[in-house]
Image (spheres, coloured by chain):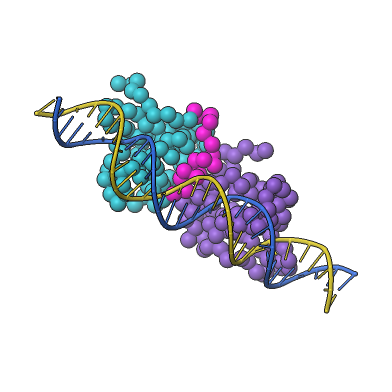
Chain colours: A cyan, B purple, C yellow, D blue
Amino acid sequence: MPDDERLPQPDTADIDLVTVLHALGDPVRMTLLLSYADGAEHSCAPRDLGLEHLHKSTVSHHMRVLREAGVTTTRVAGRNRFVSLRRTDLDTRFPGLLDALLAATPRA
Amino acid sequence: MPDDERLPQPDTADIDLVTVLHALGDPVRMTLLLSYADGAEHSCAPRDLGLEHLHKSTVSHHMRVLREAGVTTTRVAGRNRFVSLRRTDLDTRFPGLLDALLAATPRA
DNA sequence: GCAACAGTTTGATGCTCGTCAAACAATCAG
DNA sequence: CTGATTGTTTGACGAGCATCAAACTGTTGC
């Protein structure tokens, strides 16, 4: 099923660096980035992301910030949402940035 | 005069990635980063930084955020402050990050 | 000493943000 | 249809932030 719906997100050319940095300048969203760094799709459940201490609506809010900044993409399939990194788009727009960020981050 | 006083700043090992990203996730501070990218020392005068529209106290605030995040260093000489990038420290702590950021930024 | 200069600090204001709780929407299982 | 599941949206609240203005500190020059 390659043509599922996707939640609204900016075009690659419209991804703004300052907006991306603002999105990643928060500990929770950096944690999410690390989870997504494996390239796989992830559900939104807090317990699947090491965020048991946060309310699900809070996690939803952070994922919206990441998506609207252009960092992630969200595929809608039934009652599930599958979130993944827009790695190719980010590498196109900001070459080397994602690699530097992930290399700089403690792989806990 | 290599031993002028410096305003307080974190040790290289204590520079935190999320704090740096938060500091750079603001349009004014990103403008400052671009000014500092030439490696030279800069005064704090808003007019020397393309920030004529901002009050000097506002600029002072932004420079404090950058310094406390570990992005810049400030040398005190008489009644002047000379601000410059901590390029070596940042490259040590987060290899490739600064290069990616500067390459991604429109050189206006 | 005195005035001009460079920049910081403090206080105030309005806006944004992170968080939770409750209500809501949509889907799946029986 | 009913109830459980998955996630979003809205509203509220407190904390933090960007900004300006005014007061303040330290320095240079006359």
Q: Confirm whether residue B34 shows in the render.
A: yes
Instruction: Please tell me which residue lies in front, D3 or A79.
Output: D3
Q: Quadrant of residue B42?
A: bottom right
Residue B71, x across and y down, in percent:
57, 55
The region drawn magenta spans A11-26
Residue A80 relative to residue B93: left or right: left
Residue drawn at point x = 61 percent, y = 57 percent: B61
Residue drawn at point x = 47 percent, y = 48 percent: A25
Residue drawn at point x = 54 percent, y = 36 percent: A16
Residue A30, x across and y down, in percent:
41, 47
Residue drawn at point x = 50 percent, y = 50 percent: B22
User: Is residue A25 in the magenta section?
Assistant: yes
Residue A22, x across and y down, in percent:
50, 45
User: Is residue B2 in the magenta section?
Assistant: no
Residue B99, x across and y down, in percent:
56, 44
Q: Quadrant of residue C26?
A: top left
